[in-house]
Every structure is written in C-alpha cells, then in structure tokens.
Amino acid sequence: MAYGYPEFMKDIFLLTKIDLTFYKEAQMKRRIDALIAKEKFPGYKEFVDALKADSKKLSEFVEYMTINVSEFYRNPEQWKIMTEKIFPELIDKFGKNLKIWSAACSTGDEPYSLVMALSEFVPLNQIRIVATDISDEVVGKAKIGLYSEKSIAHVPDKYKKEYFTQNGPFYQISDKIKNCVTFKKHNLLKDDFFKEQHLIVCRNVLIYFTEDAKDEIFEKYYDSLADGGVLFIGSTEQILKYRQIGYKKLDSFFYQR
C-alpha cells in the first residue's frame, strides 16, 4: 500500500498530537512538501521515519508547523479599544483580579502586551495572565523575553523606557512584566479549555484552520468564558456564526458571552 499524505497525517498525530485534518489541506500540504523538499527526503514515509528517530528534528518540525508571527500591540487601533472600552467594562463587572487567557500566545508578545495595557488600571502585583502555546520552543522563547526592535515597534514609548533594556540588537523585557504571566503548553485541538475566564485573547491563529475546526474552537471559547466575559480575535478573522453560538458583538474583533 502506498504511503501518502493521509498516512502521513495519521503518523504525525501519533507523534505530536497535532491533528492536520483540522487545518486547510492545500495550504498545510504545501508547507510540508516544501519542508520535505528542502530537507531532501524522497517522500512522506522517509521524513516520518527521520522524525521518529530524531527528537531534535521532531521539535523543529512542530516549531515549523505552528506558525508564529507575532509582535507587541499588533493592530494598535484594536488595543486602543481594549484600553478605552474593554478593560474598564471588565473591571467594572468582575473587579481588578481578572482571569485572562492568552491562547496560542507564540513568543509572548501578546500576553506581555496585555500586562502593560492592564497596568493602566491594575497594579502589576495583582495581574495574573495564563498564556499557552502548542510549541515548547516558542514557550521557551516567551519565558526568555528577548525581542527585536521590529517586534516592539508599536509598544508605547513610556513602556519601552520602563520595561525594556537594550541588549545589543535585542530588547529584554523586564522581570516585572514577566512575573505577571504563567506560560503553559496547550493544544487547542486536544486539551481541555480553562473555565470562567473574563478575557480570552486568540488572534491570527485560526485562519489556518478549517471552518469546522474554527466553529468548534469558538464554541469552546464561549463555554470557557464567564457570563459577560470577552473574546478578542485577530484582524484577519471573524466569527461567522457568532449569534448561533451565543456571542454578542461588542466591536470589530471583540465578542462577549
């Protein structure tokens, strides 16, 4: 029996628990085919065998598959809505000890942005954010907190001065900010979701998923929110069935349970 892409997907799930059937097939297959060609393997079977034999290569593959493009205060106009409208309303409803989950957080730019934005309203020692990602490598990078000048381009100047130290061409984020975030490994397609969250942030990740997978995750986020809690999604995304799920649209990219 020929070993093709369907067999490859099954083996990858067994190895990594990444379910490739939830991703848009043409887009994902292109990425994998390009990687196999670059690594000079004759086909899917030989590539899988190499992943099984080499834990470092397997880790690099997971990193490659979990597309990480992130920056601080991405889409600044949306962060303006967050600070002027969303945070004040959430604090008014739930108090200052907000339960916040930054899902698929990549290299930490997003949860650290949340800490800085929330610090306008809440002392740093009261801010607790859980940030999750499927990739061990990006979680490791997030914990280190070292960023390029491009990554922090949209950070307000007062925060750049207060919370970043230049280290050669890079910028190290302050421990004061890092201490507010707990990083955990989490697979959106497999693991249990957190409950009674006041704010969930998941941006520019689900664009790579099938419509069915998106609907399932948006429903799970709805179940994860406390009544009155808010989901903040990316500027490339929309929840087509938000009314059927039960969301109320507060603003572009902000949905309330």
Image (cartoon, grey):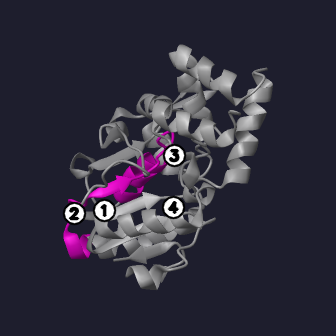
What secondary structure is marked by label 2? loop
The location of residue 122, given as percent across then percent down, is: 27, 58
What secondary structure is marked by label 1? loop
Which three-letter amino acid code belongs to the residue tagged 2?
Lys
Residue annotated with mark 2: 96
How far apart are the alpha carbons under marks 3 and 2? 37 Å
What secondary structure is marked by label 3? loop
User: 37 or 111, which is in the foreground?
Assistant: 37
Q: Nearer the viewer, mark 1 or mark 2?
A: 2
Which three-letter amino acid code belongs to the residue tagged 3?
Asp
Residue annotated with mark 4: 213
Question: Viewed as shown, does residue 143 lie left or right of 154?
Answer: left
Residue annotated with mark 3: 19
Q: Confirm whether the magenta stretch covers residue 5.
A: no
How far apart are the alpha carbons under marks 4 and 3? 11 Å
| Residue at (22, 63) in percent of width and height | 96
Q: Nearer the viewer, mark 1 or mark 3?
A: 3
Magenta part of the protein: which range?
Answer: 91-119
How far apart are the alpha carbons under marks 1 and 4? 35 Å
Tell me, for residue 214, which label it has, or none.
none
Q: Are marks 1 and 2 in contact (CB under 8 Å)?
A: yes
